[in-house]
Image (cartoon, rainbow, N blue to C red):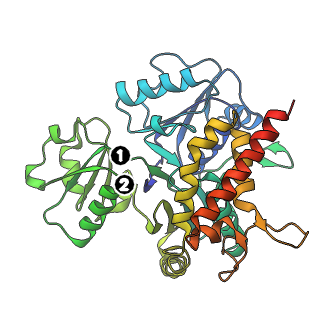
């Protein structure tokens, strides 16, 4: 499971390596969250080039070179070349000790993954399946867009096909941190319920947590820390000078840290976060959190996503391109067996909570694993045959 965090990017230096469509989405997300963005790439999309032309971002029109990641708070490698992406990760994370590094679609070379984010102008929601099923993450996002009248934050940048400016909306930057094997320091006078909740979530995500009393905290404790949680901002500030870039959360003053943890709905690897955009909307956020908890926790979504995650090695081996893999998963999770000749798309009980259709989601929910595995194997074989017979 990944750890959900809303990063404070305001005026922080962010680097994107690559200038294609994926890199463009990263740039937009960082800009609306107030990031100070630099792009390095020989080529770029029309929007990236336009943003550089009007001075919103810096664009170095060249290949990345050694030393380029020095001095950044966050680095994202989004090129089509594995060796370049790997070199960026190695330099940024291992040499320069930058805590927030993302290599698109390569989880082992990430310290964070991007979240699907929607907003209605008052609330922000982010969705993650911990990398198990991007397709299911997209379905849930589309559901929220429809029933909650929200829109995706990261579809900005064009009007009638032409690039337009991107404004800083003062929003946090929602991400999911990969905590497996990383060291987290918890600084507190006593283990309050809030400290216990943070520690439990970090441990659940695979982190190694170390509790230190504030009067015992020294700079050397923070040398290898990936993340620090403190119940008082002054505890971290007292030793921050000279440390090497850890990200931190202050429970007494969330805006003072480099991230904060939003309210969560968790069902295994499905994580949905709800956050008001300002203090006026706190009650609305609490009502929505309660509603979504009832809908998504312990209702089979986590088990379904876990099942899909177990298929990823087979699908990766069977299909050579990301598009073919995505097409297979889309077909798999959308298929409904029926006598009616009219095609029907699986609803995942998002709109119809009592749906009893013959589909993969209901088979998993009803523990009909043999039926689910048979259906999946037959569909995989059919797609393999179609793929191999295509010119």
What residue is shown at x 66% (from left), y 57% (from top)? 374
Question: Which residue matches tag 2?
Answer: 205
Q: Which residue sits furthest left?
A: 216
Q: Does 92 appear above or below 150?
A: above
Residue that appears at 52% across and 82% down: 287
- Camera-side residue: 76 or 136? 136
Label 1 Cα neighbours within 10 Å, binned few <14 / some 14-19 / many ≥20: some
Above or below — where is 98 with respect to 64? below
The residue lying toward the viewer, choosing from 31 and 26, is: 26
**234 to the left or right of 139:** left
Q: Position of residue 388 (x, y in %)?
A: 79, 33
Is 76 placed above or below 236 here?
above
Quadrant location of residue 268? bottom left
Q: Residue 370's spot in the image, x, y percent? A: 59, 62
Image quadrant holding the C terminus, namely top right
Which residue: 57% across, 72% down?
Answer: 365
Q: Nearer the viewer, residue 105 or 212?
A: 105
């Amino acid at each position: 499971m990944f750890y959900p965090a809303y990063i404070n990017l305001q005026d922080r230096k962010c680097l994107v390596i690559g200038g294609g469509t994926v890199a463009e989405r990263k740039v937009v997300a960082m800009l609306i969250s107030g990031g100070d963005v630099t792009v390095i790439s020989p080529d770029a999309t029309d929007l990236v080039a336009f943003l550089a032309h009007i001075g919103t971002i810096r664009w170095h029109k060249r290949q990345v070179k050694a030393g380029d990641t020095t001095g950044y708070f966050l680095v994202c490698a989004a090129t089509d070349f594995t060796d370049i992406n790997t070199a960026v990760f190695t330099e940024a994370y291992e040499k320069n000790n930058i805590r927030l590094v993302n290599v698109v679609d390569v989880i082992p070379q990430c310290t964070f993954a991007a979240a699907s984010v929607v907003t209605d102008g008052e609330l922000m929601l982010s969705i993650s399946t911990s990398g198990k099923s991007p397709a299911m993450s997209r379905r849930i996002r589309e559901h929220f867009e429809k029933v909650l009248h929200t829109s995706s934050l990261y579809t900005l940048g064009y009007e009638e096909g032409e690039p337009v400016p991107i404004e800083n909306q003062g929003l946090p930057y929602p991400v999911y941190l990969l905590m497996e094997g990383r060291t987290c320091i918890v600084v507190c006078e006593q283990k309050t319920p809030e400290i216990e909740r943070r520690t439990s979530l970090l441990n659940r995500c695979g982190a190694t947590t170390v509790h230190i009393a504030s009067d015992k905290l020294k700079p050397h404790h923070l040398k290898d820390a990936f993340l620090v949680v403190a119940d008082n901002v002054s505890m971290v500030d007292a030793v921050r000078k000279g440390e090497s870039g850890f990200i931190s959360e202050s429970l007494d003053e969330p805006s003072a840290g480099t991230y904060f943890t939003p309210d969560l709905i968790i069902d295994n690897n499905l994580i949905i976060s709800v956050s008001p955009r300002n203090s006026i909307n706190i009650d609305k956020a609490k009502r929505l959190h309660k509603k979504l908890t009832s809908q998504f926790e312990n209702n089979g979504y986590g088990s379904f996503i876990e099942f899909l995650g177990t298929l990823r090695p087979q699908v990766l081996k069977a299909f050579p391109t990301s598009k073919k893999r995505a097409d297979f998963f889309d077909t798999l999770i959308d298929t409904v067996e029926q006598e009616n000749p009219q095609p029907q798309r699986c609803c995942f009980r998002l709109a119809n909570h009592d749906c009893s259709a013959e589909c993969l989601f209901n088979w998993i929910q009803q523990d009909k694993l043999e039926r689910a595995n048979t259906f999946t194997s037959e569909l995989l074989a059919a797609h393999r045959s179609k793929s191999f017979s295509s010119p």
